[in-house]
Amino acid sequence: SSTTRKFGGTGMGLAICKKLVCLMGGEIGVSSTFGEGSCFWMIIPLPLADHQDAGQLSSTDESISNKETSLAGIHILVAEDNVFNQQVAKGLLEYEGAIVSIAENGKAAIAHLCSEHTDVVLMDIQMPEMDGLEATKLIRESPSIANIPIVAMTANATQSDIEKYQTSGMNGYISKPFDPDLLFRAILDIVSSKEQVFGKGFARS
Ligand code: MN
């Protein structure tokens, strides 16, 4: 639905990709067959994830170890207007076994909740048509969906922001860009307790 689909782009995207990949010490290329499609590829050297570091995030809370962060079978609605963020969240959560649905704004989120079983909502704050705060207030006022846990996903996590999320009826928040381990913990904590988890905070340290 983007304008580049209608009008074509500036032609800079691939040039930028090539520059970035080269700067990262990698390679990029393409093979293309007319009428069939194109395959764009890149190879970049990356360090392996340090699982020692990931463990430190939960070292103060031994109730959840890395092995328990499976979201198998949990129905999660991601209400988020940014397509890139939608894909990142969906990919991470599905990799952990969750069943993920996407809503592109607050209205679509409410419509989804009214028709589909949902265990937890990850709610972006700024969205077109209806933002996350308004959607949360409406959800809390709608008896059939009022008890579904809602976690704010936000880049704004000052004390006054957090109070706003709490007042609107949200159960907790995670700050963007989110750390996957903290995201999984927030979801597991909220789904298992259905309580407020604002006190713990799932902000990136
Ligand atoms: Mn947004």
Image (cartoon, helix red, strand yellow):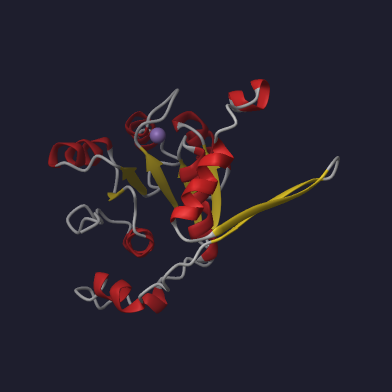
Image quarter (top left, top right, bottom left or bottom right) of the N terminus: top right
Location of residue 40 with respect to 140 vertically, above or below: below
Give the residue displayed 37% in from the left and 50% down from the top: 149
x, y (%) of residue 198? Answer: 21, 52
Is 53 rendered above or below residue 153?
Answer: below
Residue 117 at what x, y percent from top left? Answer: 54, 50
Ligand 1 in which quarter: top left
Answer yes or no: is residue 118 visible.
Answer: no
Determine which quarter of the picture holds residue 132. top left
In the image, what residue occupies the spot 52% across and 32% down?
Answer: 108
Q: Going by the picture, which residue comes out furthest to the top? A: 7
Question: Whole-percent x and y of residue 127?
Answer: 41, 30
Judge by depth and name the residue closer to the eye, 124 or 155: 155
153 on left or right of 9: left
- Horizontally, residue 156 falls left or right of residue 30, namely left
- Residue 109 rendering spot, x and y as whole percentages: 49, 36
3 or 30, which lies in front?
30
